[in-house]
Image (spheres, grey):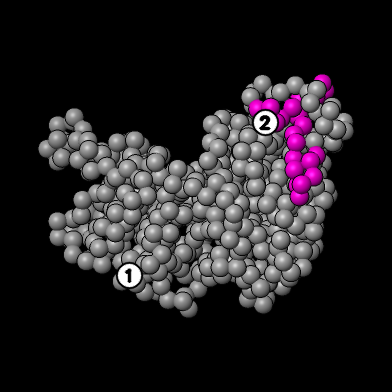
Amino acid sequence: MDNQRLADLELKTIIGLAGMPVHKDLVNPRMPLEMAKKVRVTFRPLPRDYGNQIVIRFREKLEQRLRQNGVQVIPWDDAADVPTGLVSKLLRTRKVKSSIHAVVDVKREYSLTRTLFSRLAESIYVHTRKPNRSVMEILKISGWADDFTARYVQDPFNTQIITLMPLEPEFADGSTTYDRKIAIGLKNLISTMSEIVMGIAPDKFSLVNMNLSDSIYMNDELDEFVVTSLIPKIYAPIKPPVLTRFKKGEYDPSDSVFAKQLAELGRRVEPTALFPRGSKFSEKVSRLSHRDVVETILEGRTGVSYGFIAIAESPGYEGPVTVGKEEWETFDIVESLDDPGVRESGSGRWYVKTTIRGEETYQQVPDIWIVTSRSGSDKTNLDYNTDIVRIGLIKGKLYLETPRGVDLHRKDIRPSFDTYVILAQALGAALYMPELIKDGLPILHFHGYPDPTWFAESEYFAGARNPSLPCGTIEAALLNYSAIYEVANRNGKDVRMLCLVESDHGVNLLGLDKDYLVKRLSEGVVSGRVMLGGRYLPDLRRHGLIPEPGDGETRKVAGSAN
């Protein structure tokens, strides 16, 4: 694959619209190592009486591996300042500088005094509980007595907390259901107020974050884990799309055939149980305040959702879809992109040169519109009058249309955290797999994986060996986009279903039509070859083709991928 072209051409329409700089190293095999150079991490000193030697030894190895791979590990005394206030000086309460990207800590056992204070705080919360409180409002009431590392950072939006703790036997047990594992993971994420929790055992370790993954690694995989999973997660944390980057408007759901189709698609995938409600995972959380935090995050107004469903509308074109090389070369270079590979015609349409299987095409960049479930909604019971937003990508600009009459300032009308990924998938399909999207492209994202043997003729997967990037990141969008290009380049138009794998996150299923996608997904669930959780992710990684430099890998089980 031509990395220079991939980074410099169509992807600028995604990165440019997001107001982020273009990095040409985003889609090459050294991406995590380039990320590592920009990452600053500190380790909070262990509690004085901390005695878990298994966690201590793992912590030492983790610090060593981070250093070896180029991460700047900043000593605690240099990373955390003592504030100037008199009380802070007396208590020596430190604040981690905003320039630190992550603090690695251990789960701290409570003293008798702190336990009593914590119970008092919880009692106050229970007796003053009110509906519709935000996460921060809940924690101000119930969390003042808890020893959250997050309380000691200057900028909680920039500095992630990574907590190490003993691996719980129930989580590590292969017979434990995914629902139970995620309930355990959420309990630990909330009780420690961490973005990432790692469970440590003598021979293995686990990772859980708000992507709701249940990944377990063997200790001899630590080196690969640090490079392909941990560093990318620190470099590119989960984040929602920034609404100020969108040009906002409204649409009438009753006039949108795609919105109605999306609501129906959600109802049809309900029997698969791949899109459960967030409250299903809160049962393991014993404290009422923490349970309310979990349910507020997963189903309420803060926006973290459990998967998404979307339909990319048929691409919009004006004038000729393709032009000849001679005519393309007469077009103007798009000044806002500063890239000779993207040209603008006299009518204002953008045209790019694409090369698939050695064939050059000069094609129009279409208008992209997608209807998608709003963040926080029940994907299998969508009200198309309130639960479906419409996002657009037109000439490098982002658009957001909400259902007419719905207050845009309500936080639960936010678009999916995966907005950039969804746009990248639709744009990639329009440019490289136009047959797949010409009548609308259904996209299903859930937090599980299929068995590689599930794929049939004209069905492919790609991306299983890519770095593990959280949802909401431009980098994840780039990897999804490049995977579509790779499958198209290797397999041409022979694609009926495409599975884009995101390690420690889940998969995105793109289908030629909704009926086929639902049928195949339902068959996979019934046969046990498609399921929530990470059971099949190692198999996907093993079956994927070894990528060439800059390539994503693809796999076609029924026949050769090349």
Q: How many marks?
A: 2
Identify the amino acid type marked 2: Gly
Q: Position of residue 318 (x, y in %)?
A: 85, 31
Q: In this view, which residue lies farthest toward the right?
A: 320
- Residue pictured at 46% horizontal, 76% vertical: 174
> Does residue 334 belong to the magenta stretch?
no
In front here: 8 or 262?
A: 8
Q: In this view, which residue lies farthest toward the left?
A: 90
Q: Residues within 10 Å of mark 1 (few under 14, many from 20)?
A: some
Q: Position of residue 82 (x, y in %)?
A: 19, 35
Q: Position of residue 221 (x, y in %)?
A: 41, 64
| Quarter location, residue 91 | top left
From what the image shows, is residue 337 above or below residue 252? above
Main SS, magenta region, reads strand
Residue picked out by circle 1: 201
In front here: 542 or 204?
A: 542
Label 2 SS: loop
Q: Position of residue 513 (x, y in %)?
A: 80, 58
Q: For this view, does 83 lie left or right of residue 140?
A: left
In magenta, the rendered stretch is 339-361
Query: Is any part of residue 201 visible from this angle?
Result: yes
Q: Which mark is residue 6?
A: none
Quarter in which the C terminus is drawn:
bottom right
- Residue pictured at 84% horizontal, 27% vertical: 327
Residue picked out by circle 2: 396
Q: For this view, does 282 lie left or right of residue 142?
A: right
The answer to the question of whether label 2 and label 1 lie on touching residues, with beta carbons closer than 8 A, is no
> Does residue 353 belong to the magenta stretch?
yes
- Residue pictured at 50% horizontal, 73% vertical: 177
Identify the amino acid type marked 1: Ala
| Quarter location, residue 265 | bottom right
